Image (cartoon, rainbow, N blue to C red):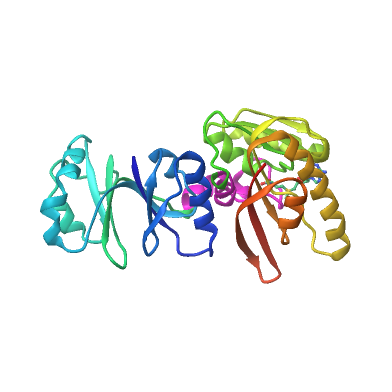
Amino acid sequence: MKVGVVLTRKGGNIPNLELYGLSSRVGRPFRWRDSYFYTGRGPLWRFKEMAYARVVGRHEFSFSSTGELPGKVTGLRRRVLSFPSFGVEGSMEREVGWWLDGRVDLRNPDNLIFVYRGRRKYHVLSEARIIRGKDFAPRDARNRPFFHPSSMNARDARFLVNVAGVMPGDVVLDPFCGAGGILIEAGLLGARVVGVDIDGKMVEGCRRNLLHYGVSGAVMEGDAREVDVEADVVVTDPPYGRSTRLTGRLRELYLDAFERIHTLVKERFVVVLPFEGEGLLERSGFEVLGKAHWYVHSSLTRRVYLCSP
Ligand SMILES: C[S@@+](CC[C@H](N)C(=O)[O-])C[C@H]1O[C@@H](n2cnc3c(N)ncnc32)[C@H](O)[C@@H]1O
């Protein structure tokens, strides 16, 4: 299916890495079309699960002026009739809506048509989803039964899982799982999740959190440097300290853990680091496929790496 994605405008190349990671595993890499608009092929439902897209839908057609609509709306008209209701949002709502028949439901349409105004053209998406930050709030760190300040918010955890292109049935390992932010998002997408953490309290908390969101998985107490679980995908956010002394020790911890992970992971490794990590990753045997800078505050910019073993 031809999928259209409008990326969010904030966050530097974070949205681009998400789309690249997801599309290169579950479809083919998307092509840039117009301002923040990209198209490609792949399972629509999976792209609708993106974190840093504004709108995702089936790409019906693009147009420059309303005079082109009569020649382009035929397929869309037919598809609209196959849903119980529809609604049109975005730019040119009236102009596009005028051509469509069926029951209109602007609040909760079964088929949302979204018209995105790019710089060059208007782009029409059907079966669209508008993605909002508040969609993720029920799973945010503070709303989980077990809270820990090191835990990642749901939108960011979903972003990492998407960079890895996680699909239903994948075995996803997080060897520094903490309160389980990443595992919850992977589990909700249908992955089989495995978590490891050195801290027994975290392991207990992570189990509680998974249970709360209906995710079944195995969570074990252990050291990431000795983990022994084969996985399709490893997604992780290891601990980071910012003093130089700690940074030295962290580098050793990362290197040992990455070398171990390299022997276990089949498809992809996605990791967040507090410093440039290409050297460490390559020394551990990984090939870096993509990277994004993730601004946290003035003295911390994390790096997100997408790697293949
Ligand atoms: C940044 S937190 C992970 C947060 C997690 N992504 C979440 O959303 O909840 C890092 C975790 O690594 C764990 N950890 C530290 N050293 C470890 C090691 N050697 N092996 C496994 N886990 C370790 C810590 O206990 C901590 O829970």
- Left or right of 103? Residue 295 is right
Q: In this view of the protein, can residue 198 be seen by the observer?
A: no
Outermost residue toward the bottom in this view: 298
Magenta segment, which residues?
134-161
Q: Main secondary structure of the magenta part?
A: helix
Q: Quadrant of the N terminus?
A: top left
Q: Residue 296 location, x and y as percent?
A: 64, 64
Q: Residue 217 location, x and y as percent?
A: 65, 29
Q: Residue 262 location, x and y as percent?
A: 73, 40
Above or below, 278 relative to 170:
below
Residue 276, quarter of picture: bottom right
- Left or right of 114? Residue 305 is right
Q: Residue 171 location, x and y as percent?
A: 62, 31
Pick whichever, 308 or 228, lies toward us.
Answer: 308
Q: In this view of the protein, can residue 300 be seen by the observer?
A: yes
Residue 166, quarter of picture: top right
Pick whichever, 117 or 285, lies toward us.
Answer: 285
